Amino acid sequence: MMFTAQIKVMPLKDLLDPQGKAVLGGLQNLGLNNVQDVRIGKHIDLQIQANSKEEAHQIATEAAKKLLANQVMEMFEVHIV
Amino acid sequence: MMFTAQIKVMPLKDLLDPQGKAVLGGLQNLGLNNVQDVRIGKHIDLQIQANSKEEAHQIATEAAKKLLANQVMEMFEVHIV
């Protein structure tokens, strides 16, 4: 069966996110002053061939740990849909 | 009140995603052959000062249209949590 895994990779809360800070400045220059903070990460969709939702989750987690996320600086969440 | 808006920005389905194709090759080199397709986009968290969930949604959508997403090549979804 084919499963879609959605992986969210975000910079860790305690780390500075310079890309987010730059976008926050851009939004304020556009007059969107209600935005107080911005953090930017990655959203990755994987199409996975697996026998069960659990197997798909395991494969997606392995992909995230080995390649998609740098766990020193980033956290990730996996959802199978 | 403070709201958190989660914005997902993904390349449009009909467009080639070269970053995703590169990651797919990397996963296959790592032996993760069950992964059939990869698409990569952005995940953006905004902290928004607003009077209601609807107002926060409106501000996040404006931010996405004006700065965060290029609607020629990308689609976006806004969720207020």
Image (cartoon, coloured by chain):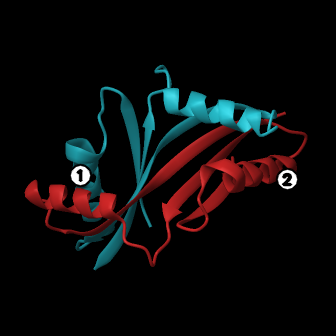
Chain colours: A red, B cyan
Q: Residue furthest right?
A: A51
Quadrant for residue B60, please give it. Answer: bottom left
Disc 2 secondary structure class = helix
Q: Are marks 2 and 1 on the same chain?
A: no
Quadrant for residue A75, please give it. Answer: bottom right
Report x, y in % for residue B38: 62, 34
For the N terminus of chain B, the quadrant is bottom left
Report x, y in % for residue A24: 22, 62
Whether tag 2 and tag 1 are in contact, CB under 8 A, the answer is no
Chain letter of the residue beneath label 1 in the structure image: B
Figure disc tally: 2
* A67 sits to left or right of B65: right
Which amino acid type corresponds to the residue marked 2 in the rendered image?
Glu
Report x, y in % for residue B79: 42, 57
Name the one closer to the observer, B77 or B23.
Answer: B23
Q: Rounded to the nearest whole Å, what is the CA distance between mark 2 and mark 1?
A: 37 Å
Residue at 46 percent across and 75 percent down: it is A13
Report x, y in % for residue B50: 23, 71
* B15 sits to left or right of A50: left
The residue under label 1 is B63
Name the one closer to the observer, A37 or A4.
Answer: A37
Chain letter of the residue beneath label 2 in the structure image: A
Q: Residues within 10 Å of mark 2 (few under 14, many from 20)?
A: few
Which amino acid type corresponds to the residue marked 1 in the rendered image?
Ala
- Asked whether the viewer can see residue A80, the reply is no
For the C terminus of chain B, the quadrant is bottom left
Residue at 49 percent across and 50 percent down: it is A42
Residue at 67 percent across and 36 percent down: it is B26
Q: Which mark is residue A54?
A: 2
- Asked whether the viewer can see residue B67, the reply is yes
* A31 sits to left or right of A70: left
Q: Residues within 10 Å of mark 1 (few under 14, many from 20)?
A: many
